[in-house]
Amino acid sequence: MQANVGAVAAASQAQEARAQRDARQDRLFSWLLKGCALLVLACLLGAAGATLWGGRHAFGTFGWHFLFSAEWDPGTDTYGALVPVYGTIATSLIALIIAVPVSFGIAIYLSEVAPAWLRTPVASAIELLAGIPSIIYGMWGLFIFAPFFADHIKPWLTSYLGDKPDDGKLSWVAAHVPFVGKLFGSDYPFGASILTAGIVLAVMIVPFISSVMREVFQTVPSRLKESAYALGSSTWEVSWDIVLPYTRSAVIGGIFLGLGRALGETMAVTFVLGNAMKLSPSLLDPGASIASTIANQFSEAAGLQKSTLMALAFLLFVVTFIVLLIARWMLRQMAHKEGR
């Protein structure tokens, strides 16, 4: 009897010791995970703080005028962020306008239309495009696409849409819609421009957006699509009314992932943007982006110019953060509407 009591006590003590050990391990695991999460937050705040601290001289010298000034003269130490910020936003929006419809078409084709034997090779090719270094896209844009753009696309745009055609006569579009005429009017003879950079960026982000869309489109339950087809819906109606609403949140997330890639792209944009610190309303004129400006000038910058480049880096961080906030707000609004 005493032996049984001792065995039960020993088993109880062993079980209690094991429970304490498991509790310690759980706490350790929880602290480890919390540390990883806080490390990401610390890196984020550290990057923002470092760029803000590095650009304090520029912000203190120019104040709010720095954000709205298009001047950039290293000789007189006069700098403004308007041209790089405008170039960054313009090229990214052009890339998004071109890439989203193309990516949607690719994803719908691979998930709904393409035969089974073609889906894997095309999907592998898209993933391969996503893995190509950005400098390769930049070299392709500089040596192949930019000359082609200057010889064949740009003359057509300036003749039929711009307000500075070669024959000296305004096109119908420029005469009736002056804003469009200013966007596509240019005397610059070469192919490097904001529009060229936007197109190259679109080629770069299409693989990212289309891959995300294809993956989420494949998560739509087959019974939903089969039910729609049974009711007589076409492939377009199924894609637009069933597939897209079901995956809307993930699709928006993929689009903003591509936008984030476009905002921070450096090498490809540097090759084809023209790197001219001059504000022009025309998309066919050269411009500058935040990333390309930093890449071109940081190695030789000193004093106030270096502080200005750090301030531009902080502005790029702010722009990207605002884009992510907009994405989160849109997703929250959609979730709120769906909850109703």
Image (cartoon, rainbow, N blue to C red):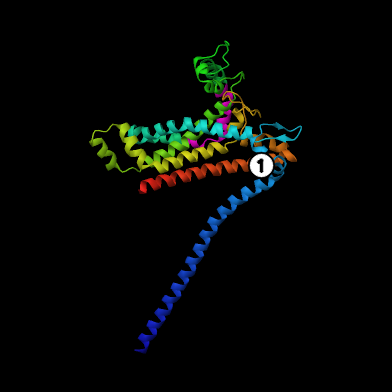
State left or right for residue 133 relative to residue 8.
Answer: right
Image coordinates of residue 157 in percent, x first then y, are: 52, 18
Vertical order, 94 against 16 (above or below): above
Quadrant for the N terminus, please. Answer: bottom left
Q: Residue 62's x, y, as percent?
A: 70, 39
Dot 1: element = helix
At label 1, counting other C-alpha atoms closer than 10 Å, the crowd grade (few under 14, some 14-19, many 20 or more) is many
Q: Residue at x 53, y 15 (%)?
A: 159
Left or right: residue 340 versus residue 296 is left
Q: Is residue 140 visible?
A: no
For the record, the magenta segment spans 128-146
Q: Is residue 11 above or below residue 206?
A: below
Farthest-out residue, top: 167
Residue at (49% x, 41% y) in the render? 257
Residue 56 drawn above or below residue 8:
above
User: In the image, is residue 232 part of the stretch drawn in magenta?
Assistant: no
